Image (cartoon, coloured by chain):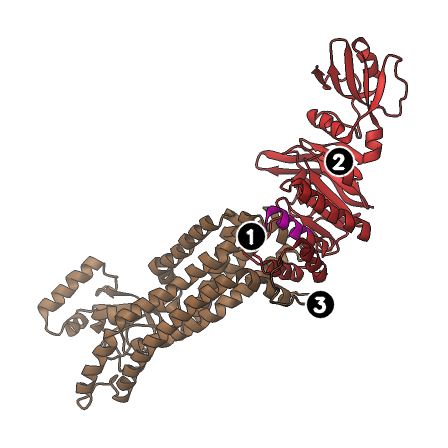
Amino acid sequence: MNAVITEEISPPISRSSLPLRAMTRVTWLQHRSLILGVLGLFGALAVYVVFNSDAVHAIYAQYVLHKCSAPVASNIRTCIGITPRIQASSDTLTLVNIAVQVVPVVVGMFIGAPLIAREFESGTYRFTWTQGMPRTLWLTLKIALLAFAVIVPACLLGLLAGGYNNPFNAIGLANRWQIAQFDMTGLTLPAWTLLGLALGTFVGALVKRTVSAMAVTGAVIGGCIVAVFWKLDYLLLSIGVRVTTISPEGLNYGALNMGAETSGTGFGRYGANISTQPVGSWLVNGWYTGPNGGRLSSHATHQLIIRALENSKRQIVWLAQHHYAYWVSYQPANRYWIFQSVEVAVLVGLSVVLAWGTSTLIRRRA
Amino acid sequence: MNVIEVSNLGKRYGKRWAIRDCSLSIPAGEVVALVGPNGAGKTTLLHCAVGLVEPSTGCAKVFGGLQAGSPEALARIAFVAQDAPLYKYLSVHAVIELTRNLNRSFDTNLVRERLDDLGIGLSQKVGKLSGGQQSQLALALALARHPDLLVLDEPLARLDPLARSEFMGVVMRAVAEEGLSVVLSSHVVSELERVASYLIVLNVGRVQIAGDIDSVTEDHVLLTGPIDEVDQVRESFDVVQILRGDRQARLLVRINGVADIGPLWESSSVSLEELILAYLRDPDSSAISSPMSGGSSQIREVRT
């Protein structure tokens, strides 16, 4: 017995030279469960970020209201109560930043990897690639549509996550140049997501087995993210650094990158008190030079600090009197968007190369 | 016009050649049976013809010169692959929608009518259909494209006799109504005589027979006669197979227009199945281009 037909099949379609609408329908029919699943993940992350962001922003509003960035006698008691409350949310900050980094991995594993691998595994490539639509066009449009489906929410999620990080950056607990933040903005997160999708698709075409492709994709894209965290981001941000000497108060140079977002002089209680450091810049490295101008080794620096502490209560003065100087290399604040663009260009470039590689593979390996 | 034309076609997977130095032409307007044992290269040949596979050597053209797999060629060829692979997790309705969107021309009503006749519901999952129903669905989708050439790779292999008959009935009706050309690969030779008009026998990657079925069968006879005159017969005819008894021998020969046989020899016609099997048993025999000499030592001899 025939089942009841609940949906009317539309008549034959007239098609423009680029069958975008037809391919949208094909992509939706084939991948709707996965698309909805991944979008559900985006949604859950967004809700989580917004929920936590609202709480942090409410406290931060108090911080701004009471001008806590410039503590004075009149506001010090209030500010002492506010700042630790923002600090207390930093555990959630870490969780949010980690959770958002997972997005490109999930997209690569669950949307990218099965895209071609499943066609090979089930043999359906013999059906799809012998229809009227050439397979290169089929692949191009499919990747483009799926990319659109994940890039737009990734961009929104990146913006939400950026907004969530702002209060922490403003009070000097975190910094927009930090790797976790730098790679999850409204620009870089969609670029990473695109790379995940392109890589998964390429691996799927290469491996031709869905589960294997998912595992390889997860390992490779995860490995890329780890490599960026471990070294690559540092190397990227080391390109074309500016070097300057600053007051030896930069002894506490680990804090140089903190609290430089809101004003030129008030770095907040967690920032270093170095007015010469350019606002919003990112310290890459710091080192001492001796009276002869030579750079001191870590060991020599350590000995120097001990001597300075032993010889004077004002180590800074002592260091200056003995012609020691502290130098930093840094990226100026105005290069932030340049570096964002560079990272996006590299990721998008890699994605395009992988998509081209996939196209070559499916032309030759069927 | 030839619907498929391949010259020096070869496809290598690693070190193994699936098909090598294959040249053949398949004329339009025929129902062509491509026959051969498993591993003969039939699927590879068809995959090259529909553009799924890029040949390692040579080339495949369709419709008198179109590159196999080109957009123009894809628009005119419908292919039903072995085991009729379809998206099992989709409903029949979704598969029809999907196919419609992958083609410029698609007759949805034709598929619906066909599926209605077969009792296949549109809301059923493809994976829940029987093998025969999946094959019928794949065929209906292919025919709804109104192709000039229908290529079927082992369509009968997983069908029971009734389903085979129904399946081929649909194909033959389409041939009669629309005049499309059909290329049908199979290693089930028993039913081909009824449906095919042209035969190609492919064995170990090379073509043994290519021709109109009536001509091919008329061109071959079974000769039965005294065993001591076998050598004389082998001088006059291309011998495909020899079966030797104690006193008599039975030879399957290609007559090549020669009518003279000795008085002690009896001639009888050969069935298509018998003919095909004889060629398949002897991959070195060939009824095309370079006929074997009657005295070739490569002729398969069977002692009875």
- Magenta stretch, main secondary structure, is helix
Expressed as whole percent of the image width and height from the top left, the position of residue B178 reads 80, 53
* Chain under callout 1: B
Q: Colour of chain B?
A: red
Q: Which chain is brown?
A: A
Q: Disc 3 marks which amino acid?
A: Ser
* Chain under callout 3: A
Is B265 located above or below residue A54 in the figure?
Answer: above
Residue corresponding to mark 2: B200
Expressed as whole percent of the image width and height from the top left, the position of residue A7 reads 61, 67
Say whether mark 3 and mark 1 are on the same chain.
Answer: no
Residue in the image at 30% along x and 78% along y: A56
Q: Quadrant of the N terminus of chain A?
A: bottom right
Residue in the image at 72% along x and 56% along y: B145
Mark-to-mark CA distance, 1 and 2: 35 Å
Circle 1: element type: helix
Q: Nearer the viewer, mark 1 or mark 3?
A: 1
Read off the magenta span.
B127-139
Residue corresponding to mark 3: A14
Circle 3: element type: loop
Q: Which mark is residue B128?
A: 1
- Which one is in front, B250 or B102? B250
